[in-house]
Image (cartoon, rainbow, N blue to C red):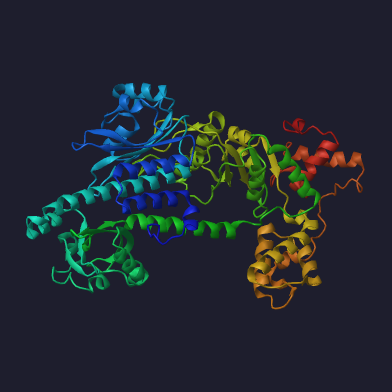
Amino acid sequence: MDQFDSSKTSAQASSDPLTAIQQRTLQLMADEADMALVLGALCDGVDALDPDVISTIMLADVDGERLWLRAGRRVPEGLPQKIGPLPIAPRMGSCGTAAFRKESVISADIASDPLWSGPAEECRVAALSHGLRAAWSVPLLSKTKQTLGTFALYYTEARRPTVDDVHLIEKASQIALIAIEHDRSKTALKDAFVQIEKSEAELKTIVNMIPQIVIVLAPDGTTQFVNQLALDYTGFSANEATGPDFRRRTVHPEDVERLNEPTASALARGLPFENEQRVKHFSGAHRWFLIHYSPLRDDQGTVSRWYCTATDIHDRKQAEERTQNENLALRDEVEQTSMFDEIVGASNSLRAVLSRIAKVAPTDSTVLITGETGTGKELIARAIHRKSQRASRAFVSVNCAAIPRDLILSELFGHEKGAFTGATQRRLGRFELADGGTIFLDEVGELLPDTQVALLRVLQEREFERVGGGQAIHVDVRVIAATNRDLEAAVANGTFRQDLFYRLNVFPIEVPPLRERKDDVLLLVEYFVQRYATKAGKSIQSIDKKTLDLLRSYDWPGNIRELQNVIERSVILNSDNVFSVDEWWLSKKSVSPPSPAKAPSLAAEQVEPRSERQIIEAALTATRGRVSGPSGAAAKLGIPPSTLDHRIKVLHINKERFKFR
């Protein structure tokens, strides 16, 4: 990671606004700018990202009892005088409380947040009178957990932070903390070096008292002195820590090679600069440090020595690396689990599904998608989201069957710090992350009764409580659920709540299995062959006719997901430009065309309307009006539920009258 490396191009920096803000702030620090200018530039950069955001930085006084506004150009005129100095107290708005608790504080609505009542009521009135409604504050803590100040974002409307908002405030507060600690170290060094004329020994004593690694270099970069903290970290004696090879013995070899030329050039220029290096601990492990180089000049303006301070940034670097790895893993997961990039097919059954998507997408109605495993239910959910008015907001997918049952409530609704063992900090749940957008609950039939109750509350009242919390959280989320289970049967046997089923089943969409989409097999095969051939760098010109017949005759119990896997495997093993599949990869039970069903056929051209009505009514009588499910009339007749529903409508049969026979 080289976000502090001045050699990065402006094109790279501009790709990430936060990186550009960070580099601008660090450049001001390298130019020895006043801290007020540095912090002001940071707030200006954050404010420029969103016209509705107002960022502020408040610093604690020497006694650590009050906060004083030090940066925030867009703060309404007159507000600082009404709220400052702000006491650091348990209930003193967002900033005063965050500084006291030493943890982040989110006030989604200043008007109703109890942290703004009592002693902070005057601050509430002042904030509201200047049009501020939401405030999120992060404490700026030293390594010894001393409160140095706060970084806060204010909004003119009540709102909760999104994932991007959390990333913004955390990254900006890290930059602010580095600037403040850098200034404190610089001030400490200046105070220390003022004494240099008195006594070199006294200087070394003072430098050893600075709670930061300090290194003194000769003009050519040779190490002349390191303070006690540096000796404690490296495990070297004072004599071992000097000389031309100290850097080679302590800095990671890759960083020595990477920074040799840039460091030599910067030393030759004689201007302050900084870089990031991995320094070896006496245990053998390396940790990342931000090294700031500051020159000391004699009366003639010649550099007589360099003073270097090293700030431990290892935890931040690791967090950035984890984030990058998680993003890469997420992209891999999306690549692996997505069944196809777009809906492929032209069969009548698929067109019927697309028609229903087009009708329900513009609404906010709850949708229940049913179908066998591997039919592409999540793809249907994403299509609904993309065509809805929420398309620009988050689409959050949750596989209810993949989450441990004792963690599902926390996963869906979040938890407060200390809610259970391992809950070391507050965590936002999937519903909060999906606020304003869509949440997709896959395998919803696997939810336990207590989770079903909580989900019912969200659907009815649009609110929930975090695990371990007592405050109701309101959300605006569209719910799309999916299952391969027969929920009506689950309701009948008492494993699924009837009221929740009705709340979910507002607009049902049944995704047909691939065996009912035989006309789409060729299109899907061509699509997947082209996709995986391109990915594998192969040129496949045609599909073997025997293979195509084989794929068409197969029943595909795993549906499109199985077809996808078979084709990907075949493309990998394919050695020429004609695509073929080994028939042994397909279940022998399904390769042959299925034998005629024993149940009477309901095709209109084969059965007279009167006899067809009698067959359907007999089946409905036997199943008490139930159409779908293993014990439904469709299964009894050996036809898809959608087909039976269609014939019932055509024949004007009232299903309800059979429920009580």
Question: Who is closer to the viewer here, 93 or 388?
Answer: 93
- Which residue is more in the foreground, 617 or 96? 96
* Count of numbered marks: 0
Residue at the bottom extreme? 575
| x and y percentages locating residue 545 in the rendered image | 81, 71
**Relative horizontal placement of residue 473, taking residue 503 as reference (left or right):** left
Whether residue 659 is situated above or below residue 420 in the rendered picture: above
Q: Measuring 76% from the left and 72% from the top, which residue is drawn there?
A: 541
Closer-to-camera residue (508/490): 508
In the rendered image, residue 473, in percent from the top left (x then y), is placed at: 46, 32
Left or right relative to 154: residue 387: right
Tell me the quarter of the picture where residue 320 sits. Answer: bottom left
In the depicted structure, whether residue 630 falls above or below residue 568: above
Q: Is residue 635 left or right of residue 134?
A: right
Q: In the picture, residue 243 is in which quadrant?
A: bottom left
* Percent x, y of residue 57: 33, 38
Residue shown at 73%/41% (left/top)?
A: 358
Image point (35%, 48%), residue name: 175
Q: Quadrant of residue 213?
A: bottom left
Image quarter (top left, top right, bottom left or bottom right) of the N terminus: bottom left
Q: As drawn, which residue projects farthest toward the front?
A: 300
Instruction: Determine if residue 37 is in view.
Output: yes
Q: Is residue 421 visible?
A: no
**Front residue (pair 320, 376):** 320
Instruction: Residue 105 in the image: state x and y as whole percent.
Output: 36, 36
Relative to residue 434, is residue 312 depicted above or below?
Answer: below
In which quadrant of the rendered image does the C terminus lie? top right
